[in-house]
Image (spheres, rainbow, N blue to C red):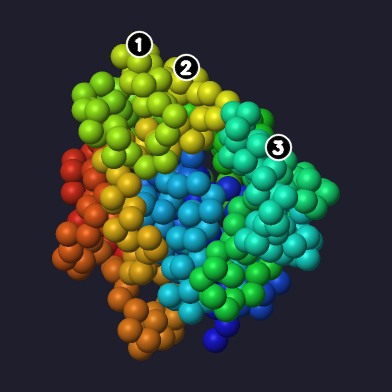
Amino acid sequence: MRVAGVIAEYNPFHRGHAHHLAQAREITGADILVVVMSSLFTQRGEAALLSPAIRARMALENGADAVFALPVCWSVRDAEHFALGGVRLLQRLGAHVLAFGAEDADISRLRAAAELLEAPPPAMIAALRRGLGTGRPYPAALSAAAEEAAPDTGRLLASPNNTLAVCYLRAIRRLAAGMDAVPVPRQGAYHATALEAWPSATALRGAIERGDWQGARQAMPESAFVLLREEAAQGRLHLAGALDQALLYRLRAMTPEAWRALPDLSEGIEDRLRAAAGACDSRERLLLTAKTRRYPYARLSRLCTHALLDITDETLAARPLPEEPWLLGLRDSALPLLRQAKAHGVSIISKAADLRTAAPWFRAELRAYDLWALGCGLPAGLALRQGVVRL
């Protein structure tokens, strides 16, 4: 039984994702294709448009055999920790190979970049410090330092999927995961805002926000579009801005101690955020007002989501890696995978009620479910009501 893994967000699922799943199965020769998917909030700190259950169903209807959640304590992180969380769950599930999208699908170049970042020479470390000293954001300073150490590496790391690909390879090495890695050439631009032959999730969300249902239909597999329309008709889309007032209240009400407890905080950025929260009327305006060269939009967005979900340094330190795979959905074809995982002592979570724990990551996930539901006008307790999708 050969198991291939994919780490994704599907916010929402589109034709490019279906293509990736088909290519992943074909290239890896997988018997079972497993997806680890961001649950309620994405790597950039944004709330997912659709619930985890609906996004899991979209994936199952279009190529996946099983979908597991990447909880918010790992999904709302920088690329390095996002990759570590996803790879760890695939490792726990016994995946033999990880298939990921990349703008540059040359595995030798990606591996060389990963090796360089895992064991940087002293000159590269010095160049990185110089870059950070000038106020450059960490990713930009790292790319520049890598370019000095190995020409063309900086260009490789300038593309978002390449960066994630390199982080996946670093995670496989760091965790001694023992799985192969297969890059799948990405079709289309990652953050393109116009719907193209191979749409980006950014462009698709824009079409949905505008009510361009014809455009959305062309961008999605038909079964996924049907689910989208059903959720929209029931008022279960979490649209941009739905939690803006909750976030602004949270930021305005936080004590100095609460600010200091947030992860990845330095250089007094909390003062800029606090001032912006007092003056701005939306999350978007807040982020545009507060961003700096060192603290770009995405990093601040994650910081705001950590504040909203009360995720602190202590929360993240309590469980550096996820251990219990949370099953969102499966086909019967994936049942051997579950039996194998359980035989190896891996606890599979099928619903929140099964996990009776006060673990900080789990409490954060329950808060994320309730806040996501609030943004859709749904009652609290969604994590307790949501069952496993079976096809």
Identify the residue under disc 1.
279
| Residue 197 visible from this viewpoint | no
Check disc 2: other Cα within 10 Å, few if <14, some if 14-19, many if 20+. some
In the drawing, does residue 169 fall left or right of residue 93?
Answer: right
Q: What amino acid is labelled 1 in the image?
A: Ala
- Residue at 34 percent of width and 65 percent of height: 326
Q: Position of residue 54 (x, y in %)?
A: 40, 52
In the drawing, does residue 51 fall left or right of residue 228?
Answer: left
Identify the residue under disc 2.
289
Q: Is residue 213 above or below residue 27?
A: above
Quarter of the rendering occupied by the N terminus? bottom right
Real-space CA distance between mark 2 and mark 1, rounded to the nearest whole angstrom? 9 Å
Real-space CA distance between mark 1 and mark 3, rounded to the nearest whole angstrom? 37 Å
Give the quadrant of residue 3. bottom right
Check disc 3: other Cα within 10 Å, few if <14, some if 14-19, many if 20+. some
Q: What amino acid is labelled 2 in the image?
A: Thr
Identify the residue under disc 3.
196
The reply to whether discs 2 and 1 touch (Cβ–Cβ < 8 Å) is: yes
